[in-house]
Image (cartoon, rainbow, N blue to C red):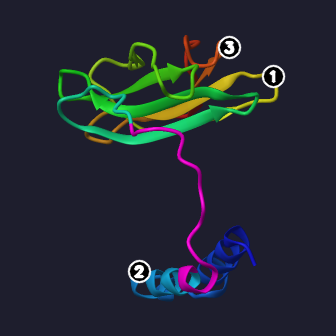
């Protein structure tokens, strides 16, 4: 049994067969450790040193890294960072050489002044377009939207946002 198969079994047991009240750290952590002792740790190949891409002095969070399926050297990272007004905005950087160098930081603008952002996620389509989704909302939680932006050049530029949920 490989690690992926074992993790799938663990997931199915913990999240599909167990009642919600039993899905706790107290059960899942020991099950994960048992799995690792049974099948061994996952193996991976490291390609280089860690690189700090955010350049922030304060809060930087919820990073989302994606790799272009047509070009493994093409990486795009999005994360939440402070915009100077103590509101959070999405920031994006692109690497075309596997993370050795990175583009300048792109700040994704808010749809409404005074809003803050969260929850970046990205995905590629079969045509090579990259999509960035996130929420832009009032800090009090009284209003906001889930938005998606498309990039036709692998994350270097972004189209206007499309509202998904209001």
Q: CA distance from mark 2 to mark 1?
A: 41 Å
Disc 1 crowd rating (10 Å Cα; few below 14, some 14-19, many 20+) is few
Position of residue 123 measured from the top left corner of the image (x, y, whole percent): 65, 35
Question: Which residue is labeled 2 in the image?
Answer: 25
Q: Which dot marks residue 152?
A: 3
47 in the magenta segment: yes
The residue sitting at 55% across, 11% down in the picture is 157
**What secondary structure do most residues of the magenta stretch adopt?**
loop
Question: Which residue is labeled 1 in the image?
Answer: 127
Q: Nearer the viewer, residue 97 or 110?
A: 97
Q: CA distance from mark 2 to mark 3?
A: 41 Å
Mark before the other along the chain sequence, 2 or 1: 2
Label 2–label 3 contact, CB within 8 A: no
Q: Quadrant of residue 13?
A: bottom right
The residue range painted magenta reads 36-50
Q: Quadrant of residue 159?
A: top right
């Amino acid at each position: 049994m490989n690690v992926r198969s074992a993790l799938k079994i663990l997931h199915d047991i913990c999240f599909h067969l167990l009642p919600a009240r039993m899905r706790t750290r107290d059960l899942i952590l020991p099950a994960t450790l048992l799995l690792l002792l049974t099948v061994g740790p996952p193996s991976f190949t490291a390609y280089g040193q860690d690189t700090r891409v955010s350049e922030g002095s304060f809060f930087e969070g919820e990073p989302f890294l994606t790799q272009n399926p047509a070009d493994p050297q093409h990486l795009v990272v999005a994360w939440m960072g402070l915009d100077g007004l103590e509101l959070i905005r999405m920031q994006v950087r692109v690497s075309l050489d596997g993370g050795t160098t990175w583009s300048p930081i792109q700040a994704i603008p808010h749809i409404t002044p005074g809003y803050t952002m969260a929850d970046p996620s990205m995905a590629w389509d079969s045509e090579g377009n990259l999509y960035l989704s996130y929420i832009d909302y009032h800090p009090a939680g009284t209003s906001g939207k889930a938005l998606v932006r498309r990039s036709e050049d692998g994350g270097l530029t972004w189209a206007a946002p499309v509202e998904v949920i209001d």
